Image (cartoon, helix red, strand yellow):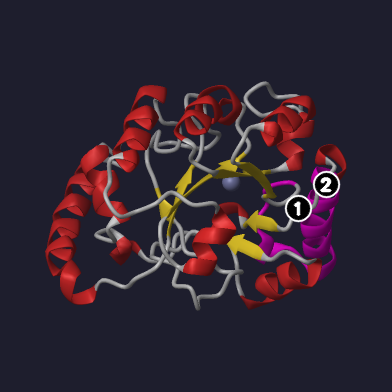
């Protein structure tokens, strides 16, 4: 995002933040990170690869936030409170940078992996052995993120079914454990895609709609808050408090 847009967003969010006590909805806040250093394809505004040091600051900031506990995805969504940490795409730096820090802080986290990226051999992404290593980290859980990272809303029914089923089957085969969570690549989801995710057996599926996830919200349309490389700790706290929820759907 361009600097002037971020500044404008900060201004709008300050107003929403001030209105917060009047309009705040309770719920779980699911944060969406991507890479921590690796170059993200198509990321023209350099929003999705955060410096490791900034990520460290974010986590220490969450550690110091009173009253918001960091929970695993399923727990947070079920109880409708706390903060949940997620990563999309399966970058190798979730293992090398995020996992040691999160394990130290005893923060659970979920990594949504695209098997097509893993199988590509591109060293930015987790390999299959690294994926197994990541799954052993205390608090780590692995979910699917499509098979090829295409927009599921643009797939015909047969292709959609393959994307949902093959990603899950491949991850279960590599990890030797059940995979029941996913996030929609590009945040692209509609009623048909949601129904297909349910039919494939996913219990939790995250999208890219800014907002808090209430305990009675749809577990297959989990709201998430997009976190950007440019977000300092103040903006992280503003986003966590809901001041950026005016952004709505991102897809
Ligand atoms: Zn993605």
- Image coordinates of residue 246 in percent, x first then y, are 29, 66
Q: Which of the two discs, 2 and 1, labels the residue nearer the N terminus?
A: 2
The answer to the question of whether label 2 and label 1 lie on touching residues, with beta carbons closer than 8 A, is: yes
Task: Inspect this view and state whether residue 207 appears.
Answer: no
Name the mark on residue 179. Answer: 1
Which residue is painted at 44% across and 72% down in the image?
A: 214
Left or right: residue 20 versus residue 95 is: left
Report the magenta residues as a range. Answer: 148-172
Q: Which residue is mark 2?
A: 172
Residue 197 covered by magenta stretch: no
Q: Residue 132 appears in which quarter of the rendering?
A: top right
Q: Residues within 10 Å of mark 1 (few under 14, many from 20)?
A: many
Q: Residues within 10 Å of mark 2 (few under 14, many from 20)?
A: some
Whether residue 22 is situated above or below residue 93 in the rendered picture: below
Left or right: residue 23 versus residue 245 is: left
- Element on which disc 2 rests: helix
Which residue is painted at 49% across and 67% down in the image?
A: 79
Which residue is painted at 25% across and 38% down in the image?
A: 233
- Image coordinates of residue 234 in percent, x first then y, are 21, 42
Task: Inspect this view and state whether residue 232 appears.
Answer: yes
- Of residue 71 and residue 186, the one placed in the foreground of this image is 71
């Amino acid at each position: 995002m361009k600097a002037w847009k971020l500044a404008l967003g900060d201004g709008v969010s300050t107003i929403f933040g001030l209105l917060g006590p009047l309009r705040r909805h309770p719920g779980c806040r699911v944060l969406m990170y991507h890479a921590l250093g690796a170059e993200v394809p198509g990321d023209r505004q350099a929003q999705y690869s955060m410096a490791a040091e900034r990520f460290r600051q974010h986590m220490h900031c969450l550690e110091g936030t009173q009253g918001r506990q960091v929970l695993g995805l399923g727990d947070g969504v079920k109880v409708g409170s706390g903060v949940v940490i997620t990563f999309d795409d399966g970058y190798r730096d979730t293992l090398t940078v995020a996992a040691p820090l999160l394990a130290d802080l005893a923060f659970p986290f979920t990594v949504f992996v695209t098997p097509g990226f893993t199988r590509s051999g591109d060293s930015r992404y987790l390999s299959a052995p690294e994926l197994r290593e990541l799954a052993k980290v205390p608090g780590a859980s692995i979910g699917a993120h499509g098979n090829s990272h295409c927009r599921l809303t643009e797939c015909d029914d047969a292709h959609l079914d393959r994307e949902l089923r093959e990603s899950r089957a491949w991850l279960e085969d590599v990890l030797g454990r059940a995979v029941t969570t996913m996030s929609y690549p590009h945040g692209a989801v509609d009623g048909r895609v949601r129904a297909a995710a349910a039919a494939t057996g996913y219990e939790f599926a995250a999208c890219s709609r800014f907002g808090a996830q209430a305990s009675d919200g749809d577990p297959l349309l989990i709201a998430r808050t997009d976190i950007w490389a440019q977000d300092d700790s103040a903006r992280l706290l503003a986003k966590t408090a809901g001041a950026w929820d005016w952004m709505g759907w991102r897809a």
